[in-house]
Amino acid sequence: MISTDIHLLLTGDELMSGDTVDTNSSMIAQALAEWGHSVAEKMTLGDDRARLVSALRRATGSARILIMNGGLGPTQDDLTAELVAAAAGVALVINADAEKHVRDWCAARSIEPNDANLKQAWLPKGAEIVRNPRGSAVGFAIEVDGTLIITTPGVPGELQAMLPEVSDRIVSIVGGGGVHRVRVQTFGIGESTAQALIDADAEPWPPEVVLGFRAGMPQLEIKLTAASASPDVDRCRQILERLIGDHILGEADTTLASALQQVLRDQGKKMVTAESCTGGLIAAMMTAEPGSSTVFEAGFVTYANSIKHSVLGVDQMTLESEGAVSEPVVRQMLSGALARSGADIGIAVSGIAGPDGGTTAKPVGTVWLAWGTQDTMHTLRTVLPTDRAMFQQLVAAAGLDLIRRQLLGLATIPHYFSRRAI
């Protein structure tokens, strides 16, 4: 008997070997959750015909919907279309819509389609295409023994672009739209601290609202979910604002950089960066967001002391007496960057990212930060004893947050630094 379950089958040797990290299953699960559904069973297999056929046969005997991810490309190890056709007991045929998509995709890139490209137009007879707005391989959907098989490409960006149509097909069969979810993006607070504050709060948390956390780098996402549109979700959002408001960046997919950009735009200001140990990462985070040209004036990456002196005007005697990782140097780096760019506010960082270069007085992980304006400049020294990549990410993220906090008039030194600043 066919259930209403949704199963997920991911394919590819690269997933089994660890060469590719599976982010697609979480992306699919999150999309399904928006419609009140979940993945009942997930399987990951390499490009092995026998194992894939067995998995398809089992799924078509139990699941109402099977989402098959991967194996739609132009190479010989892309087996999805062939195996689904075999499971359906139909032939592989040229699908006119799929062929047009491939030819249009190639023409847009001034490429003459070859046999490998056109392999992606061979689909099981009777299949309907699932449009791919970004890549050359369309997905397809076909009913097999009461199970709707929906195939999607393994490239994450292409999968993401196709999920709205995939969701529409699923909802048309098993329904959906029964949940209300708010995703709150935060920085500088851990899930245990946030949970403790909520537990200790005098206002009770409504049992109808499920509280969830998704920890990432550098942000923590807090999810509020109710079975249907409910004022309790909005009330819980207000509780979070009261308890951890200075850590909240925004909702949905808000990032540190996009939150800071919005504050800068609201206040009609522009910023500048002067970076040593982060190698331009702060500037890269800002300019990765669309609209950065309206609020980001310049970024200086001044690694060598000679460049700190010649480009930013840091005093040579100060560099020699205090060292590059020092309060006077980051102050002068920021002052020079502000003067040369004409920006309103900025951040300067200099530190020892490691794995070597530390001393007893300045161990690996030491960093000095200066942020603010020419008139109101703050500095802080801290030690972040972690690996080089994590050190750079933490310093860059904190740099953006410190500017955001100053512009909003929040606490000058946030708790994530006040507990460890030295």
Image (tube, rainbow, N blue to C red):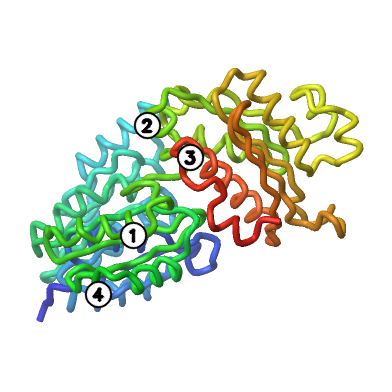
Q: Kindly identify which residue carries mark 3.
A: 404
Q: Which mark is residue 298?
A: none
Q: Amino acid at mark 2?
A: Cys
Q: Point out the frontmost of discs 2 and 4.
A: 4
Q: Kindly identify which residue carries mark 2.
A: 106
Q: Point out the frontmost of discs 3 and 1.
A: 3
Please give the name of the residue rendered at 70% of the width and 24% of the height, measured from the top-left corner: 336
Q: Kindly identify which residue carries mark 4.
A: 40
The one of 159 and 31 positioned closer to us in this rendering:
31
Q: Please, is residue 294 above or below residue 113 in the view? A: above
Q: Kindly identify which residue carries mark 1.
A: 69
Please give the name of the residue rendered at 26% of the width and 39% of the height, measured from the top-left corner: 99
In this rendering, position of residue 28 left or right of residue 317: left
Give SS at disc 2: helix
Give SS at disc 4: loop
**Contact (CB < 8 A) between labels 3 and 1?**
no
In this rendering, position of residue 322 left or right of residue 398: right
Please give the name of the residue rendered at 67% of the width and 25% of the height, measured from the top-left corner: 337
Evaluate whether residue 12 shows in this view. Answer: yes
Q: CA distance from mark 2 to mark 4?
A: 38 Å
Give SS at disc 1: strand
Q: Amino acid at mark 3?
A: Arg
Q: Point out the frontmost of discs 2 and 1.
A: 1
Q: Earlier in the sequence, mark 3 or mark 4?
A: 4
